[in-house]
Amino acid sequence: MSDRRVNVGIVGYGTVGKGTVNVLIDNANVIKEKTGIDIFVKSVADLKINEFDDQFLRKVPNKYTDADMIINDPVIDIVVELIGGYNAAKKVILDAIEKKKHVVTANKALLAVYGTEIFKKAEEKSVQLGFEGSVGGGIPIIKVLKEDLAANNIKEIYGIINGTANYILTRMEKEGKEFDEVLKDAQRLGYAEADPTFDIEGIDTAHKITILSSIAFNTIIPFDKVFVEGISSIKQVDIDFAKKLNCKIKLLAIAKKHENDIEVRVHPTMIPERYILSKVENVFNAIYLVSDKLDRTIHYGRGAGGLPTGSAVAGDIISIARDIICGCHKRVPVLGFTKEYRSYFPVKNIDDIRSSFYLRFMALDKPGVLSKIAGVLGKYNISISAAIQPGDYSPGDVVPLVFMTHETIGRHVSDAVREIDSMEYVKSKTVVIRVEGAHRG
Amino acid sequence: MSDRRVNVGIVGYGTVGKGTVNVLIDNANVIKEKTGIDIFVKSVADLKINEFDDQFLRKVPNKYTDADMIINDPVIDIVVELIGGYNAAKKVILDAIEKKKHVVTANKALLAVYGTEIFKKAEEKSVQLGFEGSVGGGIPIIKVLKEDLAANNIKEIYGIINGTANYILTRMEKEGKEFDEVLKDAQRLGYAEADPTFDIEGIDTAHKITILSSIAFNTIIPFDKVFVEGISSIKQVDIDFAKKLNCKIKLLAIAKKHENDIEVRVHPTMIPERYILSKVENVFNAIYLVSDKLDRTIHYGRGAGGLPTGSAVAGDIISIARDIICGCHKRVPVLGFTKEYRSYFPVKNIDDIRSSFYLRFMALDKPGVLSKIAGVLGKYNISISAAIQPGDYSPGDVVPLVFMTHETIGRHVSDAVREIDSMEYVKSKTVVIRVEGAHRG
């Protein structure tokens, strides 16, 4: 056996497990050429391993139904957790760390919710924990934040980081169809899961921005402090108004660092069409960073899929393998900051966050209604940057009345909308969509 | 002195030297928090050092006019070459390597032309050579290719990697002005140098794609084999026709790996407006990669400037500092491939490269002219995908006649154009612009 060989055991043979095995075995030569290291997939474990068969799996010597066979194998250097979900995955990771194995995972849900415990244990046991595949699929972003941008204070993050939601919004915009119809078709085509809740309700996006902002801002973000609103209530009429305002609606994860606190939030967001982020379509992902010295960067690619995510997982394995061969420990801290410097920043309440807003009121088309609504907005100090009142309705109809506001505090808007929604000539709940960058170049 | 301190000496205090010192000193705290390492700027050397003064330079203990003071200082761990140009910079780098110092540089011209000698010497002496700042300013791309994408075969690279050229093309497109006028204004505003040749004639772009493709394809590209055509002959009329064809004209660096050879070329290129690359405007840069497992990624940001490039240089310094503290040598090979696996792929002649083409003929508006020109194209097996013959001319005028071709060999086009240009009713040299992606989704 070569002294430049690193043994890998993979737990979980779903889409990403299969993709990772494909990448490591199909490209073993190119990895060897680049690193001089043999990355050897010694074992794969999956409860249903006996049901799987493919040309790459056939080259793996050991196939188990029990992950412990990998965790307890003394020659395994790196355990790769690709089961997904919480309990079983967490046990695999913690047991592997306990046995002083390095760990690679793509499990964003687990890291967002139980990250503190896992990161702490990895630090204690001086093992490495790679999780590039947990955000943005194959897009290099975790390592970019931890290493390439290490000389920067990261100020802001804007991410389109859920392919399913972006696919649905793209099709709604291009085809003029409503959410439910596009979702059904996306499920039929395999772009959305049978239970699409995590993707369409923003939870997956919130998991990912929790991870990104923890690294970027050197803090542990309590996942339950992240404001989350999904796209299931987005209507075609709002996409149309967005077009009239030269905007697109995207499910955006937003994180910003202020002097004494941070904001982390996920919600449908109107962004100007001239922004490159607005051109990120279908299942593609993009992360837009603002750093103090580097300024703006965008990192774009496939945010999911077995091979792209497998490429990120393999990248982590290679990086750890290089350290193993070098005899190098703790080269880069698990979260990109050394433990002794970790800070705690409170997460701003959504009501305290400044933003511009798109407001669509549904009101009776009667004289004076517009001025009364505008009057309430004024009372709450909300100033209006644009208004649209479509002309093609008959008097007495319930008509949409659209305002774009200048930047204001979330609480002012919720207070004003509550008051407006209680007016007798306002006929349904006002639609509120936050706007980013309306005033920027 | 802390045992986690790394001493840096910077040679050259121009835009990037100044930016690097700013980044390292202004963000010394954040770098310490992330890495646990004190990156200490011990010395700066510049022939005119006595003419410089700023708040960061004042914090540097040693200021020299002679780079040898840094190279010969035994406590300096990393020498940073930011002089630019060939001779003096090369001497600094080779002397520093000879003294077993690690080297960081942003000098693309030097690496593209004399890279082989420099890379070889760095490998021989087992020192590291960082050059993230040489391509795409602050955009993480070199390390991304060498590390994050190490599990991939890189297939294709498309880069907008010269900010000056992109700025001029963007203004020509938005303002309808001709090249000379925009160039003059760009020079006045500091976006183009007094001698803009390297930028507008594609030479700087060619330097950068030489470096990127050497890393991506595991080969040494002889710089003089790279086909280079600049933007100085781009006319407003062609930008207008591009718009009619739903395209934009960008100065693109293109590199593709084939089975037995590679193509590396720089030229004005028409790309479809729906491509994200077409939205990269003004001084911004973007590199679009196609990899076998990861598929498409885009890496976007500021391609020049003291602070963005200084951020990339500082990133290299940090990476080497982590290795020094770890006691880790040769963790990642200088060019991303281990020496024993370096390959040699011949560079395809531009005439043998397949592409679609935009052809603008200037011909007398007489019956039969179009069919005669189309006849010559047919004779050379060039098939036409679109044609535009504007109607607003008087008979007998010299009129533009535009064809878009399907994919064909460069030689066929040059042969056909030579024959067409010798026709009596063709009144000026035909404009030939390559087209990428016209047929792709």
Image: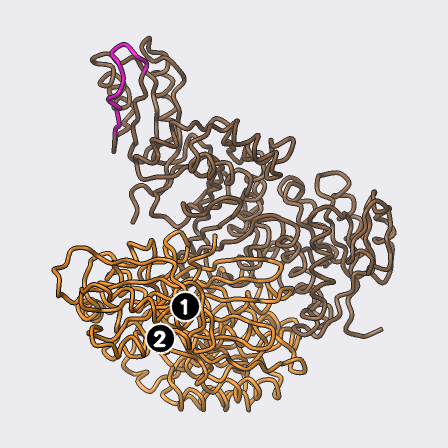
Chain colours: A orange, B brown
**Mark 1 in CB contact with mark 2 (< 8 angstroms):** yes
- Quadrant assignment for the N terminus of chain B: bottom right
Q: Is residue A134 visible?
A: no
Relative image position of residue A96 (x, y in whole percent): 51, 87
* Residue situated in front as seen by the camera: A381 or A67: A381
> Mark 1 and mark 2: span between their CA atoms?
9 Å
* Residue situated in front as seen by the camera: A258 or B370: A258
Relative image position of residue B49 (x, y in whole percent): 83, 47
Q: What residue type is labelled 1?
A: Ile
Residue at 40% from the left image edge and 31% from the top image edge: B433
Residue at 34% from the left image edge and 71% from the top image edge: A376
Q: Is residue B142 visible?
A: yes
Q: Which amino acid does label 2 sit on?
A: Ala
Q: What stretch is highlighted in magenta?
A: B387-398
User: Disc 2 on helix, strand or loop?
Assistant: helix
- The answer to whether residue B324 is magenta is no
Q: In this view, does A175 lie above or below B354?
A: below
User: Disc 1 on helix, strand or loop?
Assistant: loop
Q: Would residue A215 be found to the left or right of residue B247 on screen?
A: right
Evaluate whether label 1 is on the same chain as label 2: yes
Sort mark 2 into few (<14), some (14-19) or many (20+) by Cα contacts within 10 Å: many
Mark 1 falls within which chain?
A: A
Look at the magenta stretch and give its main secondary structure.
loop
Residue where numbered disc 2 is placed: A416
Q: Compare marks 1 and 2 and give the one earlier in the sequence.
A: 1
Q: Would residue B398 be found to the left or right of residue B33 on screen?
A: left
Sort mark 1 into few (<14), some (14-19) or many (20+) by Cα contacts within 10 Å: many
Residue at 83% from the left image edge and 44% from the top image edge: B51
- The answer to whether residue B393 is magenta is yes
Residue where numbered disc 1 is placed: A382
